[in-house]
Amino acid sequence: MKIFKLISLAFLAIGLNSCDDFDTDLDVINREEPTSNQIGIESTADKLFQGWYNATNSYDGPGLMLATMADQMSCSWGNAAMRDMSSEPRVAWNNNATYGNKNSTEVFFNSMHSILSDSNSIVANILGGGAFDNAQKAESLARFGQAASLGYLALVFDRVYPSDETGILNGGEPLAYNEAIELALEKLDLAIVAAEAGTFEIDTQVNGVTLSKDQWIEFLNSFGARLLVNSPRNATEKNALDWDRVLNYAQNGLSYDFGVVSDGWTNWYSDWVFYAIYPGWLRVDMRIINLMDNSYPDYWPANETVLPEATSEDARLATDFEYKSSQDFPADRGTYHWTTYRYSRYDEITGSGWTTTVNEMLKAENDLYLAEAYLRTGDLPNAAATINNGSRSLRGGLDDIGETEQEIKDAIFYERNVELICTGMGLAFFEMRGNDLLQEGTPLHLPIPGAALNAAKIPMYTFGGSQGTPGTDVSNGGWRQ
């Protein structure tokens, strides 16, 4: 079956293509040729969240290019496919196995399959009667590993080759992304059930924090809302979501900000965030500044070299953004990359030597899932109240919105674009995708990496530019139209 070749390639490519930072993570998790006494034991389960976190937030992953493809961040440097995939007009993803930026999909793809394999082994061991000090905790972590790996493959790629503790699923054939999301949520629900049945804390499993069982369950519920709300490829699919299900997840979701303590870029790190905030790398796209100051250009004006500071009633323009009067990016690479602001909210990360808490999921993210679920299920008063009691007022100092559908919808979009910058990988891209707002020609998802296709003897394909079905694989809309 094709799936066996794909998974075999995943383990091989991890060993061959990982950068030094990523190798550190893999050594900790011991994914390469694990021995029999290392499979299905609690120490492996304890490393699953770390494996998912580091792989999802790796420099060798899609985080940086997705931020620029969403026109939330801007960068013309060639690193991590940022320049290629934010070029205008948009182009197709280069899925050749020899492409210089292949790691942006290949390493992520391989790592998710590795995490899935380890998670499957642990669950199989538990169900087979393996001895665990705390079986419910181990199962909850392993079920999370299944859900997170399957779910993030589905968020990023057009199809997912599924497996679980019973072995290869679907006859070795891929699931469509929406089917894979359903499988991921099934596993996530089992993670919640296992946690509810157990007595434990999450401590060493998430660096620098100790979570009660109830706090861990809150995170799992918010994670379910994240997977579900961010999975649609267009507005039609988003409208058709089971919003009662989203509401249930969000009502049981985060009451706190979920962060991970970085340890100096040793074993715990969020690479794409570190690069996004580091001076001289990425900047905040003009589109975002225009949201905060409607009189400000949303696109760099022709024949201009300097723009004045923006002004806004939103207090976050002053607290979270740093005005820059000069440009880092060469004009010959396109002045559409130019912008006057960088993101400074998390400069303490750099200042601490990468040894402080990095937000993975803010309570504000869950609040916005809750508000949208209220909106979509017809409860406008609770939707407006959730927004008015959240980051819009608490950090932005903005006036309350009214209980109208358009005001609520606009406020949700605004907060996701402004408040959630540099938190969950891909959030801005997923938000723009689900609202048909990615620039025309932008891939709506990425293909299975070329090396995996070659190994499985599957014909090469890709998306972007003029390749793919409009509105399903590639954007045919866009915020600039």
Image: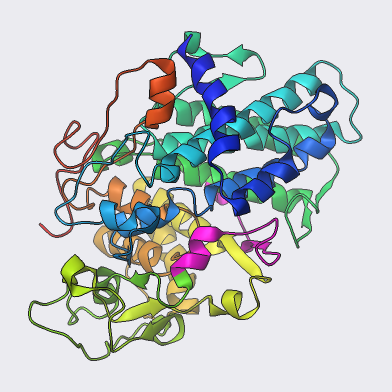
User: Residue at coordinates 38% horizontally, 47% vertically from top-left?
Assistant: 101
Q: How is the structure coloured here? A: rainbow
- Residue 191 is drawn in which quadrant? top right
Q: Is 481 positioned to the left or the right of 9 in the image?
A: left
Between 158 and 369, the residue placed more toward the observer is 158
- Residue 398 is drawn in which quadrant? bottom left
User: Which x, y percent locates residue 219?
Assistant: 63, 50
The answer to whether one can see residue 403 in this image is: no
Q: Is 303 positioned to the left or the right of 135 in the image?
A: left
**Vertical placement of 350 versus 368: above or below?**
below
Query: Residue 270 colored magenta?
Result: yes
Range shown magenta? 250-276
**Vertical placement of 324 versus 223: above or below?**
below
The answer to whether one can see residue 429 in this image is: yes
**Vertical placement of 161 versus 404: above or below?**
above
User: Which x, y percent locates residue 272?
Assistant: 49, 59
Between 333 and 118, the residue placed more toward the observer is 333
User: Which x, y percent locates residue 162?
Assistant: 52, 21
Between 232 and 466, the residue placed more toward the observer is 466
Between 336 and 450, the residue placed more toward the observer is 450
Q: Residue furthest left?
A: 303
User: Residue at coordinates 43% horizontally, 46% vertically from top-left?
Assistant: 104
Q: Where is the C terminus found, in terms of image quarters? A: bottom left
User: Which x, y percent locates residue 66?
Assistant: 36, 53
